[in-house]
Amino acid sequence: MNINKNLQNGGKLFTFLSLYIAQTIPMSFFSTILPVLMRQQDYSLETIGMLQFLKLPWVLKFLWSPAIDRSCHTLTDYKRWIFSSELIYAVIILAISFLDLETNIYTIIVLIIFAFTASATQDIATDALAVLSFSKKDKSMVNSMQSVGSFAGAMIGGGVLLLLYHQLGWNKLLPYLAIFVVVALIPLLFFKKTQVEEPQERKKYAAPHPDDLLGFFKQRGIWKQVLFLFLYYAGLIGTLAMLKPLLVDYGYSMKEIGVMSGVIGTSIGCVGSLTGGFIVRKIGCFIPRIVFAICILATTIYFYLLVTQLTVNTATLHLGITMLWGSYGMATIVVYTTSMYCVREGYEGTDFTLQTVITHLSGMLMAAGAGKIAGMYGYANLFLFESCIAVTSLLYILATFKKEKKDETRIIR
């Protein structure tokens, strides 16, 4: 009996791993290659920083998330949303492959925004299905799959594909990427065992209501979580956004950047997320939330010292990249786990989306601001500013979450 249950859980986890990887690979590829190519073509750091707004659909996706929650009452409903969104995603990627990167850059950017909209829609349905498909004690497992899928996708899209781009070029590589997005849907065809209730058992509402969205913010104590989500990543995002331009400015080639950031960096992020998932599952979120915040602060301080006091070379950069991606990977588990416990019944997709949108919005603002600060005042002042944000986040956690140790430990167990 336990063997069958473990096999079922393993199959479900693999399905979500495939879906999250399919989301991330194209996004990571486009997000990685465009800043590098634009910097090589002498675009300003301010302009490169504005590329973070390509992810605007991932910030606005909360607007249509209630429609998905309302229309999904069975596993078939969720599959329909996921399949249709991902197929649109693949078609747009294929269309982009016919365009020239140097002469059609703005057309490509517009199409990428549409592609990211389709991917964001798939993410809403996937997250909601993930919340409903696992018991409370197993939610940390799917959180790890989400994080590992994201980092593995980033490693492939920002590392492996960057290396393949060097060999194949833009027009030959993207069709294979579109095919992969479709192939990644195959495990979902065999996804049958789930905890999604039948239509008559799930809540239905006569008409859309403002509380579909606003009701999340009316929950008792929820604003502590909202501010936590806004601050937690903020100390890292600016550094992540400017890492590739920094490597370009220090003379590293596209191939070297692909290895350092896209392969090694995201591999460390994957290890960090697995480690963070194990720690959170064992001891709850209270202590890891603090420890991971300290890791974020140490990372920002290191990058400040790197460009002001230390010798910048491959070894010191690798250490910084390891700290950066490792901290990010561990922090991701705390964010996902606490977010899953804050969803309302019947609004799983909406509430989880709202919380991830908060982190995306914070990240976009920080990344755009990072380009401005780095362009006007230099990298050193950017990393100093990031350190101040990390200190603020740590102090907020220490001051706000003191009384939640017992509650979080009980929930995790």
Image (tube, rainbow, N blue to C red):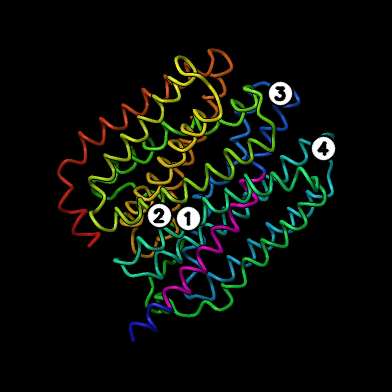
Q: Quick one: 40 or 256, which is closer to the camera? A: 256
Helix or strand or loop: what does disc 3 sit on? loop
- Find residue 107 and report its horizontal and vertical position in percent: 78, 40
Q: 279 above or below 101?
A: below
Rounded to the nearest angstrom, the CA distance separating label 1 from label 3 is 33 Å
Q: Which residue is mark 2?
A: 274
- In the rendered image, which residue does mark 4 sit on? 104
Magenta segment: 8-29
Cα–Cα span, label 4 and label 2? 40 Å
> Residue 83 appears in which quarter of the rendering?
bottom right
- Residue 260: mark: none
Q: Find residue 43 and name its label.
A: 3
Q: Element type at marker 4?
A: loop
**Whole-percent x, y for residue 276 in the image:** 35, 50
Return the x and y of residue 225 as percentages of the image width and height. 31, 44
Mark 2, secondary structure of its residue = helix
- What residue appears at the point 79 percent right and 52 percent down from the top-left corner? 95
Mark 2, residues whose alpha carbon is within 10 Å: few (<14), some, or many (≥20)? many
Label 2 amino acid?
Leu
Label 1 secondary element: helix
Report the residue marked by disc 1: 148
On the image, the x and y values in percent for residue 130 come to 44, 65
Q: Amino acid at mark 4?
A: Asn
